[in-house]
């Protein structure tokens, strides 16, 4: 009861390919390459779901940089696991598309703080400014 959770936005993490496609982006060929950040919970969830499907990867390229994953996916180097807001940013919006029937992970971004920390005007102002900036980024 002493924790406040303010949901800011929702996002979907899924498999993405370039609109031009490449042999490395055919998930049913057995030759597809996966490009992902293996440290993310979202990646782990999607990988577990792909094991139950017919999607197979011959190898995995890892990176903790989502922009690099998006760029490699854009060039056709493989299938990227990306949040929608990364894959549809201005530079990539016309070149990436979600893989049809791919597993997804619904992601929620929230601002979490202790309710008793909001007693001073300074703390309330700081929380409102953080919330405003995060919503602006979305």
Image (spheres, grey):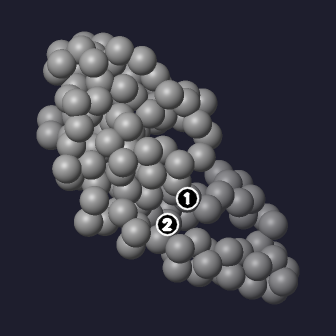
Eyeballing the image, is 90 above or below 11? below
Residue tagged by mark 1? 110
Eyeballing the image, is 7 above or below 36? below
Seen at 15% across and 35% down, the residue is: 101
Q: Position of residue 132 (x, y in %)?
A: 59, 81
Observer-nearest residue: 89 or 101? 89
Would you say residue 103 is visible in this rendering?
A: no
**Dot 1: few (<14), some (14–19), or many (≥20) neighbours within 10 Å?**
some
Would you say residue 29 is visible in this rendering?
A: yes
Observer-nearest residue: 108 or 87? 87
In what element is the residue under mark 2? strand
Seen at 61% across and 62% down, the residue is: 111
- Quick one: label 1 or label 2, which is nearer the N terminus? 2
**Dot 2: few (<14), some (14–19), or many (≥20) neighbours within 10 Å?**
some
Quadrant housing residue 10: bottom left
The answer to whether mark 1 and mark 2 are in CB contact below 8 A is yes
Q: Position of residue 129 (x, y in %)?
A: 68, 82
Seen at 36% across and 63% down, the residue is: 92
In what element is the residue under mark 1? strand
Seen at 58% across and 36% down, the residue is: 63
Observer-nearest residue: 3 or 95? 95
Q: Is residue 90 left or right of residue 115?
A: left
Eyeballing the image, is 75 above or below 90? above
Quadrant housing residue 80: top left
Q: Position of residue 72 (x, y in %)?
A: 44, 45
Q: Position of residue 35 (x, y in %)?
A: 44, 33
Observer-nearest residue: 41 or 76? 76
Residue 8, numbered label = 2
Q: Is residue 19 left or right of residue 58?
A: left
């Amino acid at each position: 009861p002493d924790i406040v959770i303010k949901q800011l936005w929702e996002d979907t993490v899924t498999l993405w390919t370039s609109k031009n496609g490449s042999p490395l982006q055919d998930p049913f060929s057995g030759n597809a390459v996966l490009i992902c950040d293996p440290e993310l919970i979202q990646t782990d969830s999607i990988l577990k779901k792909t094991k139950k499907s017919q999607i197979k990867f011959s190898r995995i390229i890892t990176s903790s940089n989502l922009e690099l994953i998006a760029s490699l996916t854009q060039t056709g180097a493989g299938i990227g696991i990306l949040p929608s807001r990364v894959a549809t940013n201005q530079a990539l919006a016309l070149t990436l598309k979600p893989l049809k029937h791919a597993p997804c992970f619904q992601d929620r971004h929230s601002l979490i703080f202790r309710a008793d920390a909001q007693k001073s005007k300074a703390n309330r102002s700081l929380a409102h400014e953080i919330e405003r900036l995060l919503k602006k980024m979305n």
